[in-house]
Image: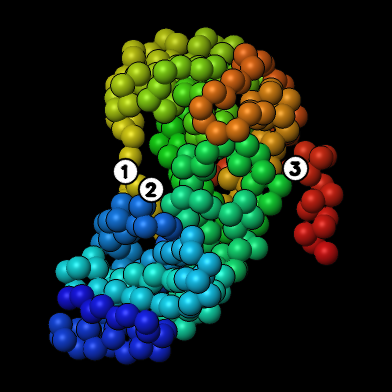
Amino acid sequence: MKIDLTDTTASKVNKALVQGRRAIGTPAVGMVLTLVIVTDEENAYDALKAANDASHEHPARTLVVIKRVSRSPRDRTQSRLDAEVRVGADAGSGETVVLRLYGEVVDHAQSVVLPLLLPDAPVVVWWPVNAPLDPAKDPLGALAQRRVTDTYASEQPVRDLATRSGTYTPGDTDLSWTRITPWRSMLAAALDQVACEVRAVEVEGEEFNPSCELLAMWLADRLDVPVKRSLSGGPGLTAVRMDTNCGPIKLDRADGSLATLSIEGQPDRAVALKRRETAELMAEELRRLDPDDTYASALRYGVDRLKSSGSVPKSEGRAGLALPAPVETAAKAPAAEATAQAPVRREPPALEPVRKAEAK
């Protein structure tokens, strides 16, 4: 069921939600969170489809905020809120409100969203595109317990990744990090099978893929070994090679679907390592709403690795970006066991002032 509202208010939207639930015979819906999607008109459909698919696992009230910025000076002064309320089959396993903001109200989106949040339920804000560099300081991000971005959608993904390492706030996460969860799990499981010391690592993948950078950061952070970042034609991550005192360990995925795990002295094994859809990534992120300390450790440590390796591009935009030849960089983080969610035992000296400032 869909209800269209033109030049409306948040109060009228709430009434339309109640009316819609009564019309389909479900006055009470068991929703577990509020998901706020901040996007543009071009990407709204794909983002909403992913959210609806994820809602089958996490029933939610989904608020899609579309800021319509007019080029006409006259239209900029005319504030207006249009809304589309969806309940039932049109809204997945929850309910959806598409909010289109015009004029001055664009700069006050939080005042529109706040009355529509579910009471006593966590709030997650997701920027599929055009995410702020400091999500926690964004007016909508300040309402949330979890803030989800996607640096892969950025024009300068590696540069934005480096910037976010300095603005990280507990609760921040990125779908580029979520994409490498199967890789981290597989590599940790491979190391659990051998009693070997890792001496060096090579991460191979696409040139402007932030997931490749994050995986290299994580391995450097947890293993305290030199990490080499090499380039390939993709898709995405293509291989991780670890040099150990017991022989090489390789996880190679050339086709974006099926990978081969090779461990010295053991037969090669084929493992499923497919590239996942956005709905699967969001469903994974919504399972845990607590801060991801492993992501924080890898991200904060990784900014030094990005700068020292020359991976931060100096030109603008994706086109024409030229990264220097990958170089080997020695990790400065303390040694730690490579596990998919291993706790941070100790921070490198360069991060101690940050931790002290947060404590204050």
Q: Secondary structure at mark 1?
A: loop
Which residue is the site of mark 3?
347
Q: Is residue 300 above or below residue 41?
A: above
Q: Name the amino acid, label 2.
A: Leu
Measure the C-alpha gap from mark 1 to mark 3.
34 Å
178 on left or right of 3:
right
Measure the C-alpha gap from mark 1 to mark 2.
7 Å
The one nearer the camera, 28 or 43, is 43
Is residue 127 among what the camera can see? yes
Q: Are marks 1 and 2 in contact (CB under 8 Å)?
A: yes
Which residue is the site of mark 2?
281
User: Residue shown at 29%/74% (left/top)?
Assistant: 84
Is residue 285 among what the camera can see? no
Q: Is residue 289 above or below residue 355?
A: below
Q: Name the amino acid, label 3.
A: Glu
Lower position in the chain sequence, tag 1 or tag 3: 1
